[in-house]
Amino acid sequence: MGLKRGAKAQVWSIDLVIGVLIFALISVSIYAFLKTGGNDNKIKRYSEEAQSLTEKLIDMGLINRDTGEFNETVYQELTQMNYGDLKDELGVRGDFCLFLETDEASPKLIVFNNKTGLGSQDFVVGNLPCGGDI
């Protein structure tokens, strides 16, 4: 009779292990599904923020809405601003880097006021920190 108890306990343990594995698999699947949805939301939020930033830069006169021409004077003024002030002015919550490059087959970085771009120096542009002096 002692063997039967051991056998039942062993079978019960295997059932428990299988049940736990199935539960874990379902939990991981649900987490992965929810996480993917979260990434879609982040992508949507970043896209909306990028669109808003573009509109603000156009409103500031950086790019002519009608002709698409770039205004170097406005860009130079923006490069002289402190990063924190620039974020506030543009209404950006996260970090950003705005840089310019040529539209050639092999693009080259365009430098204004000896700076690689506008934004957070946590980003790297042309092996230099964004907004860093050249």
Image: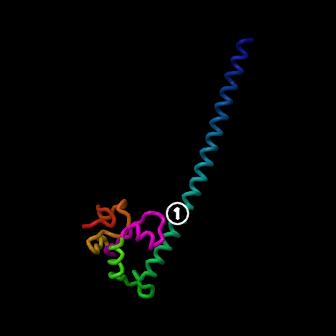
* Quarter of the picture holding the C terminus: bottom left
Looking at the picture, how far across and down is residue 46, in whole percent? 50, 65
Q: Is residue 90 magenta?
A: yes
Quadrant of the rendered image containing residue 26? top right
Q: Nearer the viewer, residue 105 or 109?
A: 109
Q: Position of residue 32 (x, y in %)?
A: 58, 50
- Which amino acid lies under the numbered mark 1 shown in the image of this protein? Ile
Query: Residue at left 62%, top 40%?
Result: 24
The relative height of residue 30 versus residue 47 in the rendered view (above or below) is above
User: In the drawing, does residue 128 fall left or right of residue 22?
Assistant: left
Residue situated furthest left in the rendering? 134
Q: Which residue is disc 1 drawn over?
A: 43
Q: Which residues are magenta?
A: 82-104
Number of marks in picture: 1
Q: Residue at x 47, y 68 (%)?
A: 92
- Which quarter shows the N terminus? top right
Residue name at image x 36 percent, y 61 percent: 123
Comparing 76 with 42, the one in front is 76
Looking at the image, residue 72 lies above or below residue 36 = below
Residue 83 coordinates in the image, percent (x, y): 38, 67
